[in-house]
């Protein structure tokens, strides 16, 4: 339980504090080179969702629709975690990262109507979409969740046990 909620809280804390530093210390569209031709801190406000999907206009209907969708996802991930919790640290961390990332961006959208993005990677002029810590947490969380399902889930173990029992070994 602590891994789930603790991970989510840590992601929210880190995400919100770094976003505060970016918003208070930079002007929108300002970019600071960290590693030449590879990594920049570039401050933008994203009114859409991941990678600017749904556009950059500040439509209030879109804002409330996205808030509803993200809040629903946060509730569903928590229900899923409570129902299927296997007391496996990887499962708890994965779900906690997803919840924390979703909550971090939810807080931005709720308070200011947009999400603060600032991490920009690429090679020379070929740049990846600007993102933030919350986005990274969701991505890592989903990756860990897939690893858990493939290698550690009870379904995987019970399937192996049944096939071993049927073959007469073990």
Image: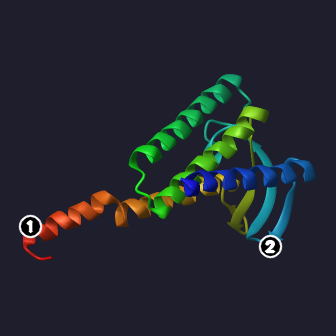
1 or 2: mark nearer the eye: 1
Task: Give the x, y percent position of residue 152.
Answer: 37, 65
Q: Is residue 109 above or below residue 101?
A: above
At mark 2, the secondary structure is: loop
Q: Which mark is residue 36?
A: 2
Task: Give the x, y percent position of residue 106.
Answer: 67, 39
116 left or right of 106 in image: right
Quadrant occupied by the C terminus: bottom left
Q: How many marks?
A: 2
Q: Which mark is residue 111?
A: none
Distance from Cα at disc 1 to Cα at disc 2: 59 Å
Say which label, 1 or 2, has the lower sequence index. 2
At mark 1, the secondary structure is: helix
Q: Is residue 29 visible?
A: no
Q: In the picture, residue 56 is in which quadrant? A: top right
Find the residue positioned furthest to the bottom.
Answer: 169
154 left or right of 98 in image: left
User: Label 1: which residue?
Assistant: 166
Q: Is residue 136 visible?
A: yes
Q: Residues within 10 Å of mark 1 (few under 14, many from 20)?
A: few
């Amino acid at each position: 339980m602590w891994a789930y909620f603790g991970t989510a809280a840590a992601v929210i804390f880190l995400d919100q504090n770094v976003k505060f530093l970016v918003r208070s210390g930079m002007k929108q569209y300002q970019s600071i080179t960290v590693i030449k031709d590879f990594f920049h801190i570039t401050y933008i406000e994203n009114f859409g969702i991941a990678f600017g999907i749904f556009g950059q206009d500040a439509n209030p209907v879109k804002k409330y629709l996205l808030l509803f969708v993200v809040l629903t996802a946060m509730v569903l991930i928590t229900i899923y975690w409570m129902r299927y919790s296997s007391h496996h640290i990887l499962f708890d961390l994965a779900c906690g990262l997803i919840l924390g990332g979703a909550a971090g961006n939810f807080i931005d959208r709720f308070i200011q109507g947009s999400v603060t993005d600032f991490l920009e990677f690429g090679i020379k002029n070929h740049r990846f979409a600007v993102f933030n810590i919350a986005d990274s947490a969701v991505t890592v969380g989903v990756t860990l969740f897939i690893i858990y399902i493939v290698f550690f889930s009870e379904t995987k173990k019970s399937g192996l046990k049944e096939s071993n029992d049927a073959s007469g070994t073990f």
